[in-house]
Amino acid sequence: GKSGYDHYMLKEIHEQPRALRQCLRGRVDELSASVDIGDLGDLSPTGVQFVACGTSYHAALYGAQLFQAAGIPAQAFLASEYATGVPPIGDALVVGVTQSGETADTLSALREARSRGARTLAVTNVVGSTVARECDHALYIRAGPEIGVAASKTFASQLAALNLLALGTTSTDDTREVIAALRDLPGQVQSILDSSAAEAVAELYQDADAYFFIGRGQQFPVALEGALKMKEITYKHAEGFAAGELKHGPLALVTEKTPVFAVVTGDDERARKTVGNIKEVEARDAPVVAVTDGQNDAARYADEVLELPETHPRAAAVLANIHLQLVSYHTAALLGRPIDKPRNLAKSVTVE
Ligand code: F6R
């Protein structure tokens, strides 16, 4: 059942601390700053191609960045586009990210990769799923069953599992910091669930014409995911952009009726550039909701703030997404939408 929650989606949003603990349990050792993902630790890929759809594609974009940061060439592909114009695979590892493990587009991209000699790995929630049976290897995200059609806890768990995959198969300078950030994540997710101002933000902007989401680097996939969730469950127009792309077109759509959610953490060059983008939308009178850790000037130019604790940018992506899930959920609830079963959508998409 829904354990007292109005919708499965809200229940599943609240299950994220537990889902993340399950994903990390027995796989991370903080003392030795090491990750144990069994045999997968021996994969040592020289290149990685991710294939996925929808929310899982956003996780794949994030995963590709983790490998790039470790000096391994990596790219994320929409599974349905994979067959066209894919660069040579060589001995790359092809990773299918799919919660259900049954998504036809993703299965078919992985079959294509296998037919070209690639090793394949499934990152999935479902033991015994088609993807797990067909791939050479599987990494389970252990989120527990997800009933709501819109993916919530499985996205958070995919991001955590992709961190384990990157840490377990590559070496980076900041392994210790990332492991510490992963350890803190379930508790930080809980405090966001307990204190997020998302419902108040949803009330303020429920009548908006459209919603925009911007982010850079690790926060770019979060912007895309924020917009997808908003579309799916509120039926409102929403778009996610790389913050730097705003002025290359989308800025023409920005008005006082289009709230812009800006995810910006830390105080580096990237954060400063995103703050610059926030100023650009603020100058067009768009309401700005900053999802920020207070390390930069974002809050100064924002109408509303959704607060993040200070952490590694990788973990901040998971945390920022929790606020955005709640904004979409509460907006959809205020609009009276059938949140767990949005029109025209199915939980698992078994046709191409
Ligand atoms: C979004 C959503 C879909 C799925 C996509 C892939 O909330 O649920 O976009 O993410 O259909 O599904 P899986 O991960 O099962 O391959």
Image (cartoon, rainbow, N blue to C red):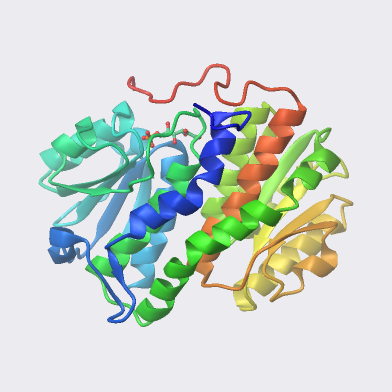
Image: 341 above or below 169? above
Residue extending farthest to the top is 344
Q: Which of 121 and 110 is in front in this view?
A: 121
- Residue at position x 30%, y 27% from top? 104
Task: Note whether residue 245 is visible.
Answer: no
Q: Nearer the viewer, residue 98 or 46?
A: 98
Answer with left or right where residue 309 lies relative to residue 278. left
Q: Tell me the quadrant of ligand 1.
A: top left
Image: 55 above or below 60? above
Residue 69: image location, x then y, percent: 38, 71
Q: Which of 206 and 82 is in front in this view?
A: 206
Task: Note whether residue 246 is visible.
Answer: yes
| Quadrant in which the C terminus is drawn | top left
- Residue at position x 61%, y 73% from top? 310
Residue 25 location, quadrant: bottom left
- Residue at position x 33%, y 72% from top? 70
Answer with left or right where residue 38 lies relative to residue 323. left
Residue 280: image location, x then y, percent: 80, 60
Residue 344: image location, x then y, percent: 53, 17
Residue 208 location, quadrant: top right
Residue 188: image location, x then y, percent: 56, 63
Image: 51 above or below 278? above
Answer with left or right where residue 349 lies relative to residue 343. left
Q: How many callouts does the rendering have?
A: 0
Residue 192 location, quadrant: bottom right
Image: 77 above or below 6? below
